[in-house]
Image: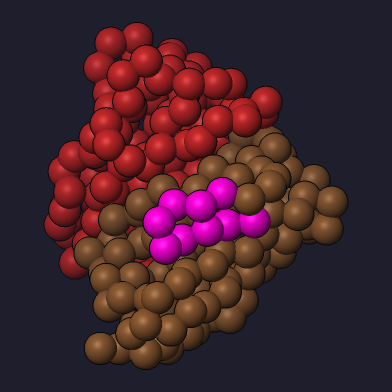
Amino acid sequence: GIQVEQSPPDLILQEGANSTLRCNFSDSVNNLQWFHQNPWGQLINLFYIPSGTKQNGRLSATTVATERYSLLYISSSQTTDSGVYFCGSNAGNMLTFGGGTRLMVKP
Amino acid sequence: NAGVMQNPRHLVRRRGQEARLRCSPMKGHSHVYWYRQLPEEGLKFMVYLQKENIIDESGMPKERFSAEFPKEGPSILRIQQVVRGDSAAYFCASSPLQGFKAKETQYFGPGTRLLVL
């Protein structure tokens, strides 16, 4: 099955800083999603982005399907951005998730 | 996320008891997926169901775990004779399209946190 790897595994930022999170996947996919798991454990859909670029406020994502990676950009980070960011991709029935990037934004 | 409902949100069981987790998909969605998240890990697929059918259970443990999605009512994930290693967050997701050709987002519920004492 598909392998999904995320980097970096951990990231500490000062409030206001920018960051880039990466998701590599091992095969062609139909679906690529980014999620934010907040400190209360809830999974928040950020982007559905099998290819191309999307933006939503301070967040944007780019997927280059031919090179099998996706990037999540967080600009002007806030403490509420803290949590774990997961990417998930599928070529079949299920999403395969990466191990996540654990982000801590310090005030 | 809005619309996928799971209950209970928290469940405590003693070893050997049964755990029943419920998931109501978003309105109009007939495809349900269950995922398990062990502490400090990512989510792992367990099972994919449509109404009255199990489509893919390749991620489901062979024993003690079962899932159903009846014609009426929520999808149920059932864990019999729970052990401490079953302690995890169990997430349900739904989508409106058939899984293997899915090009649509899977929408996740808030999860059920199971603690086995």
Q: Position of residue A6 (x, y in %)?
A: 61, 70
Task: Please give the count of numbered marks on the rendered protein.
Answer: 0
Q: In the rendered image, is residue B88 in sight? A: no
On whether residue A58 falls in the magenta region, the answer is: yes
Q: Is residue A67 above or below residue B105?
A: below
Q: Position of residue B72 (x, y in %)?
A: 28, 11
Residue placed at 67% from the left, 28% from the top? Answer: B100
Q: Main secondary structure of the magenta part?
A: strand
Chain A colour?
A: brown
Residue placed at 29% from the left, 56% from the top? Answer: A42
Left or right: B112 as drawn, with respect to A12: left
Q: In the rendered image, is residue B73 in sight? A: yes
On whether residue B109 falls in the magenta region, the answer is: no
* The chain in red: B
Question: Which residues lie in the magenta part?
Answer: A54-62
Q: Position of residue A2 (x, y in %)?
A: 73, 52
